[in-house]
Amino acid sequence: MRRTVIAGNWKMNMTPAETKKFIGELAPMVAGLDKCDIVLCVPAIDIPAAVEAASGTNIRIGAENVHFKESGAYTGEISAKMLVEAGVEYVVIGHSERRQYFGETDKTVNLRTKAALAAGLKTIVCVGESLEERELGYTETLLKYQTKMALTGVTAEQLKNVVVAYEPVWAIGTGVTATAEQADEGNGFVRAAIAEAYGAEAAEEVTVQYGGSMNDGNAAELLSKVNVDGGLIGGASLKTDKFTAIVKAANA
Ligand code: 13P
């Protein structure tokens, strides 16, 4: 049975001191809610504070990006090995904000995914269509293409450490959530792409999250769908009460 994963993506929010305070508050609120994995993906500078504060709790720490080379002249970048040594377990790859603002492509998403998996990290690979692409009727084609491109060269064994997040770009930070049916359908396209590449049995085991304005009010309905195995949460992951409510919805 695939594991439900509730992950916060803090984006460019929270200082190290705020991180320590937040996790100190959150830990007792989510203690024992173990029917899902609870992950906070935090800015690189916050990782040491986050790992320390989460130590001994059921909160796992993720990064928001990783470079694909092991080391070298790549100013400003962080390798998978560095993340592992810092105590990171998960990494978000190919978020639409990175695709939109930082020149991320399907090719670099694939390189990062392979590097992260080779180092033993669990990946949260993001895919999703824009409003224009949806209106043109390309959602299925695009989601399948992005998923297959991201996973090219990933072995069936490594697939066990892959989580994919379906995040429709039009639903991110807009307050417009996909309907539960749209989320289920999009996640289903992702799973179908994985089935085409690895077989139906392997695809059934892959956790596929939904992301895009998921919050304490809509999480239960989204998570009730058969293909929605968790959430990647932006804004609502910055509030302990809202994030806890989502974790509780996943534990109901
Ligand atoms: P919001 O939950 O703020 O819409 O962000 C979603 C997201 O991009 C998570 O990666």
Image (cartoon, rainbow, N blue to C red):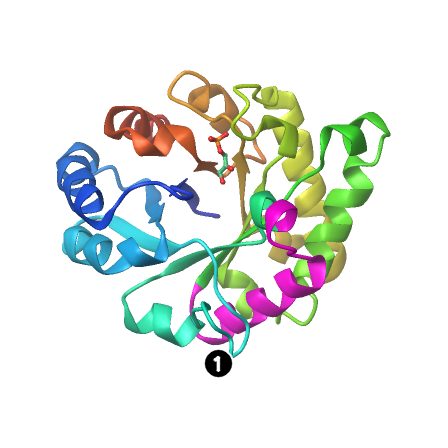
Residue on which the image places disc 1: 70
The residue drawn where x is 35% and y is 58% is 44
Q: Nearer the viewer, residue 15 or 212?
A: 15
Mark 1 crowd level (few <14, some 14–19, many ≥20, 10 Å Cα): few
Q: Is residue 137 left or right of residue 75?
A: right
Q: Quadrant of the C terminus?
A: top left
Q: Main secondary structure of the magenta part?
A: helix
Q: Nearer the viewer, residue 30 or 3?
A: 30
User: Residue 190: x percent and y percent?
Assistant: 67, 45
Q: Is residue 43 left or right of residue 48?
A: right
User: Residue 232: x percent and y percent?
Assistant: 46, 39
Is residue 210 shown above or below 157?
Answer: above
User: Residue 50: x percent and y percent?
Assistant: 23, 53
Q: Residue furthest right?
A: 136
Residue bounds of the magenta highlight: 99-121
The residue drawn where x is 43% and y is 35% is 233
The residue drawn where x is 73% and y is 28% is 131
Q: How many marks?
A: 1
Q: Residue furthest bottom?
A: 72
For badge 1, the amino acid type reads Glu
Residue 199 in sight in this render: no
Magenta stretch: residue 100 in it? yes
The residue drawn where x is 53% and y is 73% is 115
Is residue 75 shown above or below 55?
Answer: below
Is residue 100 shown above or below 199?
Answer: above
Q: Residue furthest top?
A: 217
User: Residue 180: x percent and y percent?
Assistant: 58, 22
Residue 21 in sight in this render: yes
Magenta stretch: residue 77 in it? no
- SS state under label 1: loop
The image quadrant that residue 150 belongs to is bottom right
